[in-house]
Amino acid sequence: MMGEPVADMCDQLVKAVNVMMDAESSQIYRLEALKFCEEFKEKCSFCVPCGLQLADKTQTAVVRHFGLQILEHVIKFRWNNMPQQEKVQLKNCAMGLLSTGTYSILEEESHIKDVLSRIIVEMIKREWPQHWPDMLKEMEALTSVGEAQTELVMLILLRLAEDVITFRTLPTQRRRDIQQTLTQNMESIFSFLLAILQLHVDEYRKLAKAHCRVGVSTLNTLAGYIDWVALANITNDNCRLLEMLCLLLSETELQLEAAECLLIAISRKGKLEDRKPLMVLFDDVAMHYILSAAQPVGAGVVERHYTFLKRLCQVLCALGSQLCSLVVSLAQEVPANLSKYTEAFLAFTTHPSQFLRSSTQITWGTLFRHEILSKDPVIIQMTIKYFRATMTNLVKTGFPSSNDSPSCEYSRHDFDSDEDFNSFFNSFRAQQGEVVRNACRIVPLEAFQIAAEWLQYQISAPIDIGTTVCTCSKTAEGLCSILSPSVVQWDAMTFFTESVVGKIFKNVEDEKLPVDQGIELLQAVLNYNTQDPLILSCVLTNVSVLFPFVTHRPHFLPQVLYKLFASITFEVVEESKAPRTRAVKNIRRHACSSIIKMSRDYPQFILPCFDMMYNHVKKLFSSEALLNMLEKCALMEALVLISNQFKDYNKQKHFLEELMATVVARWTSDEMRRVLWDPALFLDFVGADQLVAEGIEHTTGINRSRLSFCVYTILGVVKRARWPADLEEAKAGGFVVGYTPNGAPIYRNPCSAQVLALLPNLLALIRTHNSLFLPENMCRLSETFSKAYDMIEVEKNMVLGLPQPALDIYDPPVYKTHLERMQGFFCTLYDNCYHILGKAGLSLQQDFYTIEGLAEQIVGSVFVSLDNVPDHRLRTMLHILLSHYGEEEEEDESCEENQEMLEEQLVRLLTREVLDLLSKSTLLGERSDYWDAGKEEMMSTESQAVAVSPAQPTGELTELGKCFLKHEDIYMTLLTISFTSLSWKDTSNCHRSASIVCWTLLRQVVGGNLLPEAVTWFYTSVLKGLQMHGQHEICNSALTQLALLMYENLRPRYMELRAVMTQIPNITHSSALDQYDQRLLEPSSAQRLGEKKRKDQFKKLIAGAVGKALAQQFKKEVHIRNLPSLFKKPKPEKRDILETSESGALAALFSPVVDDI
């Protein structure tokens, strides 16, 4: 008979559980019930009988689940203090629950099965194999009871593998014991799993649903083991496991799980020799089942089958990857069924699902790059088929909101919105471009032929604007939208042609180039006339793509230039009085970019047309309204690039003087000087202190435009004007003015004189711009422009990592508010000033660095009023200077939240820029792409983190760094920033500082006379870093290494470090610290430890300083005790091998020690 207290307590617990789970319960009652249940689990002495009573089949599912949770809680938190008899009794009761405590497999709730399997696994983790040697036999015996028990056994084995291998939730020794025992028994475990699978699949084929459930469970369990067991277990018995999995691909209810297992098996890494048996999947039978499984089933998209197709596609990808790894020499045969495999793979590349198409791209790229397979006739033939498939795949169709393509239905399963799809498709297209370029190495001329046919077809095809014509603007009537059929076709063809033609000049000898056909295509493109801006944009791209052919037929050059110059002034006639649409602006910008690109890549070739171009540019400049400021600057840049080919200093200098005459006159005028040197006059000049109503033209817009034009022009000239790369040509042209002591030539830039004359006002503008943020100048802003210095939307999105809205179907005219225009003006003006300053040193060289009082002038402009300059402006300054150094309401509430995120992210990015500047200016060989490379690392799992944790940094100082070292105040500031950054709220910053920057900087001054207070502060900063970031394994490793280096190098001289150590919480009593110090301070001590043991001991000493993640801070600790070791090694006798005979010494070194198991 069960005792009264137990029965009463069970009644109360049942009521409490029902209150918690009842949707009608009030929050107060629910919290009271929860508190009662939690206190019961923590304090009650008869938890086990209550748990067993509540877990009885007669109770409701929620009560049973709670009863089983009680048992799990007892095992996790009380097991170590339970008498042996109680443990055995609980284990027997749990096994009884497995045998008879559940309903049939189809009736039982999945959460009951889950918690029941957890109970058994928790006992296994504490007692197996030492105290429960027959566990596997007991599990095997259970499977003969029925399907429900077999499924539970599968869940137990899977959970065990996950806890021990995948999540590693056990202490090291326990994990090692269990893993080694599993490995020793793996052959029998796999035989057992396969037998279960075979038995229940056979029964399932007789339409027994219960056996299907067991089959699924067994496959899931296999998936948990296939990932880590020895490959021999997978390929045993002539790959029986793989054969069974292939057969199951045809079973609708089991195919998805079978594909998962197959994928994990084929994706295994390891020795090539061990992986060779996997090639059995290229045999006729396996390939037949894989191909059959890929066939469509019925109409429409069936979600489970679609998910299966994704897995099957991954299987084929993994198979291709193994093929490429194994066919490493001609001695290794290419599979006879390669053709069948590639056809199956191509079927996925031509599937209506855009996602499936994209999934095949990486494998195609690997095949086309492969040294041996790319020469195989099957792959060569498949390359042409791939090109044909890509012609279809590059066409942007399949938007989830549309119904104009079979892809749409699949897209609705894969993407939440058209924006999501659009973002995906852009990545997919870039992938295809890379694969097409790889494929062009195999059949370049055939690829060009396909591109040529497609281009000719598009030129001859009539324009189809489709049904998504813009109705919101009269100016766009009759023009294509971004989704019009003609535009998506032109866009796809242009991208394909670009990918192909670029490679043909690299992969085909000059004499075999299809020059005549290329020129014929170019002629067709030049003759094609359209007033549709979206299609004209594609036309211009094709002109640029085919331009290299012109170098073989120079007389076509004027025609190309005429086409581009005509596009620079492109207008849609009806919109001449309205603001231009984005598409029209893009055309004009596109034409300018094309001319700059040609002038940069083919300046010598274009030089004969220089006078013609210059005269045309003068003619365009004569009308101020014909071109906007950016278009004028672009044309000037192109002319400067070509003028570099004069190779005559005086001639180029004279040209630049003429080109910049207007800008120099305006920039150095008395009026401009007054404006640039006085913040109040500057704000008045640009109109930021005026009230302006929307719809009324702002009269100072012309002032802003002229000011911006001056700055853009200076930047363009500084960026593009250069001396000849060839030393002899430079000497002959008068560019060389002397030689350095080590014999390097000293060049002069033909733009130096003009730029140096403009520099004082530029520095004044920078100083004035910084002064605008002072309170007395902020209050001068009018109400219209009170937010003129705020970040523009594009910048905000970039900082927050939000994608730019890429879908603009209707392309309205670009109307901007007065505030938006003013924000854009200040933003670009500020950026460009720093770009000029950053490029001046590289461009003007000694002419810039020998300016009298240069340092004072820069300090008096760039570094003025920095306390008032907002973070986003500071970041711009740092980022630009750093990049050049390397070369050398409801809405209001939402806005406030966004603003908070924005500010936090800005601070994070700004601090990274500071650290970038610090490390790149002081440390040799510092990577400029650190943050990009580190993004993935910061999110690593523990096992990955260990792999990427840094070794001891060995960086040396740059020449500038050595210069800083001589100035104590500067160097200590650098050290202070570096060590402070360890506890900034940014793991990337912390990791970089700890692993690369801090010790490299500190090491230089370790031998000096550092103050004890400074040493203490540096060391405390590292411990603060551990407190903040210690829960991240990769930061923990770097910080521990840094603390160890500092302690070992500084402790002998600074007793104060011991005082810091004694303040660490929970430090293992002082004797451990005394022992460590003794070994450290007496290097000759016989107790000197190896590096790994030393590091482990030090790690234990500072463990109390390591912070926990918020989720772990209030978590109850689970303690699993180690059991007697399974694998004891006898300690070998210590002996001095030098004292033994010579032969004996060697024998002793290599004698095997037999494990006593």
Image (cartoon, helix red, strand yellow):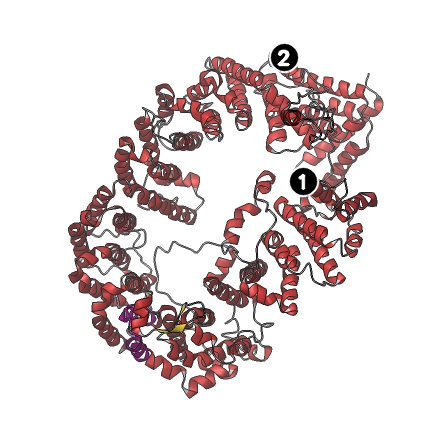
Can you give x and y, in whole percent of width and height, for residue 1026 in the image?
A: 69, 50
Residue 132 to residue 442: above or below: above
Can you give x and y, in whole percent of width and height, for residue 165 in the image?
A: 60, 30
- Assess whether residue 654 is covered by the magenta stretch: yes
Question: Residue 891 lies in what quarter of the image?
Answer: bottom right
Neighbour class for label 2 at 10 Å: few (<14), some, many (≥20)? few
Front disc: 2 or 1: 1
Residue with the most extreme right position: 4
Number of numbered discs: 2
Residue 292 to residue 445: above or below: above
Secondary structure predominantly adopted by residues drawn in magenta: helix
Which amino acid type corresponds to the residue marked 2 in the rendered image?
Ala
Number of the label disc, if any, that sits on residue 141: 2
Q: Is residue 104 visible?
A: no
Circle 1: element type? helix
Choose the circle earlier in sequence order: 2 or 1: 2
Q: Residue at x 33, y 81 (%)?
A: 661
Residue with the most extreme bottom position: 670
Can you give x and y, in whole percent of width and height, for residue 1133 in the image?
A: 74, 26
Q: Over which residues does the magenta segment extend?
A: 631-658
Q: Quadrant of the C terminus?
A: top right
The residue tagged 1 is 1092
The one nearer the camera, 1006 or 992, is 1006
Q: Quadrant of the N terminus?
A: top right
The one nearer the camera, 1083 or 1056, is 1083
Which amino acid type corresponds to the residue marked 1 in the rendered image?
Lys
Question: Residue 741 lies in what quarter of the image?
Answer: bottom left
